[in-house]
Amino acid sequence: MNTTERKLVRMMADTFLKLDHIKKYFGGVKALKGVSLEVRSGEIHCLAGENGCGKSTLIKVISGAHDATEGEIYIEGSKIDKLTPIESIRLGIQVIYQDFAVFPNLSVAENIAMNRALMTGNKKMNWKEARELALQAMEQIGAHMDPDVLVERLSVANKQMVAICRAIINDAKLLILDEPTTALTANEVEKLNTIIRNLKAKGMAIVIVNHKLDEIYKIADRLTILRNGENVATGMITEFDRARFVKCMTGHEVADTIYRPEPSDEEIVKVENLTKKGAFEQVSFCVKKGDMLGITGLLGSGRGEIGDALFGIAPAEEGVITLNGKKIEIHSIQDAMQHKIGYVPEDRLTQGLFMNRSICQNTVAASIAKYLGKMGLNHNKMKEITNYWIKTIGCAAPSAEATMRTLSGGNAQKMVIAKWLNTEPSLLILNGPTVGVDVGSKADIHAILHNLAKKGIGVIIISDDLNELIHNCNKLIIMKNGRTSGVLETGDMSEAELTGLLNSGM
Amino acid sequence: MSKKVKHILATNEAIVVYIIIALCTLIGIVNPAFFGVSTVITLSRAMLITLIFATCEMIVIISGGIDVSFPAVACIAMYSTIRFLLAFEIDSPVIAYLCVSVIGLLFGALNAYLIAKIKLPPLIATLGVSSVANGATLAFLGTKEISNIPEKIDALSKVFILSYTNPQGITYQLTVMFLIPLCMILAAFYILKYTMLGRGIYAIGGDKNAARIAGFNVTKIQFIVYMTSGLFAGIGGLTYTILMRQASPQSLMGSEMMVIAAVVVGGTRITGGHGTMIGTVLGVLLIAIVQNNLIMLGIPTHYQTFVVGLIIVIGTSITSLRAKKIANSAKV
C-alpha cells in the first residue's frame, strides 16, 4: 500500500461532519427534534424522508442558514460553536439547491468562478482567470460546455453541472445535493451518478437528499431516514430492504399493490388514429371500465402531447375520440371540459394550482359554475365540498381556508385531483401524477385512482416512473418519436423488461 | 474564430449599428451635408443629457429594477440648488454640483429604501417618489422659470472643447459639458464589466435569490444602484440647466419614456440581467439621429414622434423575439 492509498483509506474512515441531537424550533413548531447525523469523507450518504420531515431544515442548519436551537455540530472533529453561511463554506461545505441557484444571464465561466471571487473578497472581475477556473472544474468532473455560453441556454442537466463545478472549485469537502434528480431524465441521472462516484473516489463526503427509492439504492453507501423531525434509522444501504425502507420513511407498511382489474366490455374512451403533426401520429387505444391506461416514453417522445391534445390545450388535427359511446370533438379546453374531461398537468406549481389562494378556492376552481346561485357564489357550499374532499381524499390540510402554499407536495397534488373529481369527470388524464410526491401520499393517490377506474371513470396516466406504471396500469402505450407501440398488456411485465422496451427500436 | 465573429455580428448591438448605418446612408443620400464634422458635433450635443440619464437608467434596469423618478429628481435637485445659490448669492460651479449630487443621492437612497427594505415594486416606488419630488418642487419652490443663473455657473455653457468652422463659415462648437456623460459612460463600462460590484448588479438582475445564496449583499447593491441613479439624475439636471441657461421646475418631466426606450432599443432587457454600455450609447444615438435628422429626409417634424415610436416598437420587438427564441431553442 503506498502512501496515497493509505491516506485514502484513512480518509474514508474519517468522520467529516457530526451532528449531535440537533433541535430546531420555529416559534412553537418543532422542525427538528434531536437529529443526529454522521457523514464520513469518501462516502455517499443519502438523506431520505417524506416531504416535511425536516430534511430541508437540517440542510439549512449544516449550511449555516439556520441556527440550531440546541445540539452540537462537529466538523472534522472540532466543535463548531456558531456556524454562519460563510463559515460553512470556508469549512468546505457546499450545498447545491434544487433550483441550482445559478445565474441564467451570465456565462458558464462566470457562474462557476463567481463564488470563488466572492469568497476571496476580490473587488475586480478577472475574466481570464474565471475562464481557466471553469475549464479546470469542468475537466475535473468530465463536463464539456462552452465556458462563454450563457447559462439560460443550457439544459437542466447542464445547469446542474455548472452548480456542481461551482461547488467543487471552492475546495469542497462535503457536497450536499438537495433532490438533484427531480428534473433529470434517466440517462442524465446515470451521468450524474458517475460524477458523484468520481467525487467520492477523490475523498469528498457527499450527502444526497432524495425520496426516490430506486435512485437511492443505485447510489447510496449509507442511509439516514428522517421522519417528523427525528432520525428513525441509519445504516449501510445493504441493511435496508425495500419494505424496511418504506416502513421507516412512512411509519407504516406500504404494500406494493399491483392493480389488475377484472376484464370488462364496457368501453369508456376510444381513441382512433389521433394525429398531430410534429407531435404524435396514429395513436389509437381504448379504455374499458376498470382499466388504467399508462402512456410513457422518453422526454420529447410525444407522451405529454397526447394529454395536451385530449384536453384541448394543443388539439389534435385528425382522429376520432369516442367518450361513453358518443363521438366528441375537442378543439379547445372548453370543449374538453364540456365533455367532462379532467387534466392534472405535469407542473402543479405553475399549471395546476393557484399557490397563493386558499385550498377552497383551488378545489372549486374547475367547477365554480356549480356554486353560482341567484344570490352570487354560495360560499358555504364551497367550503362544505372542500372539507368533504379534504376528508375523502385524505389530505392533511389544516383548514379549507389555508393557502395552497402551506401544503406539502403530496397533499397539494391530492387537491389538484380533488379539483377535477369535483367536476364529476368521465375521463381523467394525469400527467406525472406523483412527481415530487412522497411514498405515503403516492400510495394514497394510486388507491384513489384505482377506485375511480373501478367506478367506470376513464383514467389515463402519463408518466416516466416505470415502477408506478407497472404497478398501476394494466394497459400501456410506449411512445417513441411521436409513434406508438400500440397497446401492451402489462400482465407481469418487470421494470427491466419495460426499460428494455423503452430504449429499444420497438 | 469565425463562430465568434458570427456571434458578434448577430448581437443586439450589431443590429442597432445596422439600423443606424442604414438610416445614415439614407439621410446622406438625400442630403450629403449630413456626412461631416458638423453632424458629429450637433449629435453629440443632442445626445448629451439623454446619455447621462440613459447610463443610470441602464444600470437600474440591469439590476432588475426600473427608475422613472429621475426627471423629477433632476428637476428638484437642480431647481432647489439654483434657488439656494441665488438666495445666498453663491456663485460656484463646484458647490452647485455638490448640492445637486447630495440631493440626488438622498432621493436615490429614498428609492432604494422603499425598494430594498420595504420591498415595494420598483415601478411603484419610483413613481411615488417622482410624484413627491415633482409636487414638492412646485408646491414649495415655485413654478417660476429662472433665467438669471449665477454668472460663473452660466459661463460654463460657453466653454468649448471642440470648434469647427465649415466652408460656409458656420461655426460648430462642442461644449465642455460633454465630458460629463463621457466620464460617466467610461466609469459605468468599467464598473459593470470589470468589478465584482458590476457583476453583482448583473447577478441580482438575473436571480436575486441566487445572488443572495452566492454571498452578494443584495440590499447594499440595490442601494448603490438607486443612489447612483439619483446622483446621475441630479448632475444631469444641473447640466441641462447650464446648457439651457435657465432653470425650469418642469423642464425634464416626461423625458423618462424616451430614455427608457433608448436603453431598451440598445439591447437592455427590461426584465433585467442583460445590457451593455455600448448598446445603450448606440440606442441613444439612434434615437438622437431620428429626432434631429429625420427632417433632412423631408419628413415633417410632427412625424418624428411617430417614427421614434415605430423604432421603439420594432427595436424592442427584435430584442424580445430574440430572447424568446433563445428560451425556446434547443438547450446545449
Image (tube, rainbow, N blue to C red):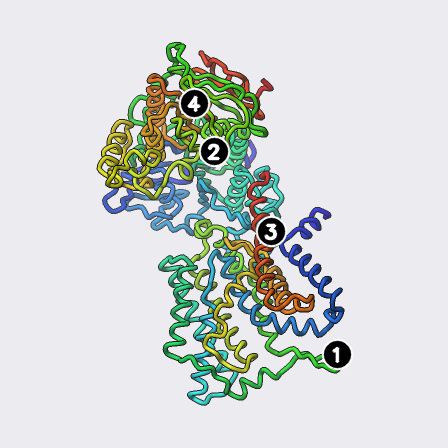
Q: Position of residue B298 (x, y in %)?
A: 68, 67
Q: Judge if badges 3 and 2 mark residues of a common chain.
A: no
Which secondary structure, mark 3? helix
- Foreground mark, 2 or 4? 2
| Residue on which the image places disc 4 | A460
- At 37% from the left and 15% from the top, the residue drawn is A290
| Residue on which the image places disc 2 | A313
Which comes before the other along the chain, label 3 or label 1? 1
Q: Is residue A184 left or right of residue A266?
A: right
Instruction: Name the amino acid type tagged 1.
Output: Asn
Q: Position of residue A7 (x, y in %)?
A: 51, 37
Subunit of label 4: A
Instruction: Name the amino acid type tagged 2.
Output: Ile
- Foreground mark, 3 or 2? 2
Which comes before the other along the chain, label 2 or label 4? 2
| Residue on which the image places disc 3 | B318
Quarter of the image where the N terminus of chain A is located: top right
Subunit of label 2: A
Which secondary structure, mark 4? strand
Instruction: Name the amino acid type tagged 3.
Output: Ile
| Residue on which the image places disc 1 | B166
